[in-house]
Image (tube, rainbow, N blue to C red):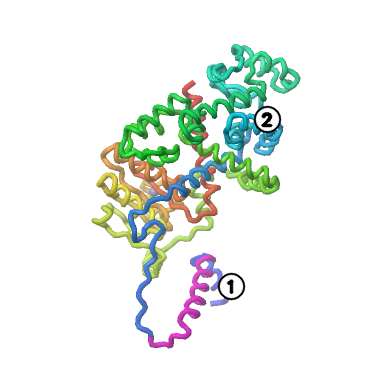
Amino acid sequence: MPLSKLRKHFAQFWPHEVVIAIFLLAILMVITFRDKGCNQSPREQKVILPRYFTSDYPVKFSKENLIAGAIKTYDPIIFNVKRNGGPQAMMERIDQYDLAINAAANKHGVDALTLKGIIYLESGGDIYALSGSSCAGIAQFSPSTARGYGLKVAGNWYRFYLRFKKSGADKDAITLSRIDERFDPIKAIGAQAAYIASLQQKYGEVDFAVAGYHMGGSNLSNVIREYRAGWQSPEKITWEDIVFDASPSKHPKTHRLLFHELEDYSWSYYFRVRSAMKARSLWKMDKAVFAQKVEQLNNPIRRTQLVTETIWYPEEKMPQYTMAQVERWAQSGLFAKIEPSDFLNIQLNKVSAPYLSQNAAGVLYHLAGQMRQVTGHGITVNSALRTYEKQIQLVRQGLSPSVYSSHLWGEGIDIDPYNSDKLNDQLSWFLDQLKWRGDIVWYREGNHFHITVAPNEKFVTLASRAILNLHVKQAEESRFASK
Ligand SMILES: [Zn+2]
């Protein structure tokens, strides 16, 4: 076989990464075993433990990791704002009010960066900002909240006025802010600081104040009351505690209120503000790095690529395995063979090849363990790895939309739904937690839960941006539809 043909052969069946990995492994083995002579006893098979499957199972997420993960999920949105001239223009606008915000924060004893994070999200520093729900100005006060904090509020006529005057509104600022003080940035910022301070005083902590800024005090009180009335709430709680703890089994009422009844993804507002605060700090520290980050998160993603899997696993780069390869690699530890397990309550149902990547197996074990612990029910897997032939067969039968699938390389898992809405809701909750961490994407596909496990950390930001774009779009569409 000529060398070029051989290389082509290798490139086709052995991706570069694998060749490099085998090469590095060989070097490592030479280093490890060179001094030990040749009469070694057979080596014990090394068991590679997946990320979540450790000896102190079930694995608990650390709260810090979840918080950081939840905040990070929103970075792509924060750095990829299209309105108000984009992130830099928004930050520059807020710069103009830096001193005013710092002074107001000082006066009311609240955190200035928090106020700036909120302003970034609410108006991007645009003092004429108007939203559909009659909120106005740099701090986006509703008429009633504004009046409650001593601001003069006009009737709604100016909305039409502003719409016609959009471009040349600057010279009318003084007139407008006299009629409606929500358009007076200095007064609005003062009222914003006072509002946050009063929420903070009432609820004890700034995280509740931020959550309350978006959902309103009465909604916030309801959420806290339901959570407190639920199962085992500790003496001191934070907003993150409620969000991360409000599982449908443990806190059904809080769960329903937070995730099904409150609109606009209100529960996530606090994390979005934290992400905006992070962005604000970066802007103040290094504008060039800020610009880089904007650039990085603005890379155009083709519409067809708005599906995370294609970003995590670009079609042209993914190998096609034969069953023989999979079995060989399973023996060497690259794939995990999934077995039905009484301990974790894992059942296999019509699974054609019971293999997953080590990482995907870890996610599966983790989920099954959590489900079993909380509900007593495990998980029934109905598809793990598939061969290319199997996938083509599924496409021909109309059971799969594409020959390109994360099941082809063991990063896709399909789980049977339960007969109970409550159990399905509980599983969705656990899946959401993994999603917040950027470890998976998941969706209901036909009559099962499909999960694709993330390849590694560096693709997570791009992928979560794609997911969030879809979510925002869905939210916008539903808001539009409800009008
Ligand atoms: Zn699937």
Given the image, on which type of amino acid does mark 2 rest? Ala
The reply, left or right, for residue 212 in relation to residue 234 is right
Q: Is residue 74 above or below residue 455?
A: above
Q: Decide which of tag 1 and tag 2 comes sooner along the chain.
A: 1
Given the image, on which type of amino acid does mark 1 rest? Ser
**447, 129: nearer the viewer:** 129
**132, 187: nearer the viewer:** 187
User: Which residues, given as a range, are shown in magenta?
Assistant: 16-39
- Label 2: which residue? 100
Q: Which mark is residue 4?
A: 1
Q: Is residue 181 above or below residue 452?
A: above
Is label 1 in a helix, a strand or a loop? helix
Give how far apart the Cα atoms at labels 1 and 2 are.
Answer: 68 Å
The reply, left or right, for residue 185 in relation to residue 382 is right
Q: Is residue 56 above or below residue 146?
A: below
Residue 160, position as x, y percentages in the image: 64, 15
Indicate which label's residue lies in the foreground, 1 or 2.
2
The reply, left or right, for residue 202 in relation to residue 327 is right
Crowd class of label 1 (few under 14; some 14 to 19; many from 20; radius 10 Å): few
**416, 289: nearer the viewer:** 289
- Which image quadrant is residue 417 in? top left
Chief secondary structure of the magenta portion: helix
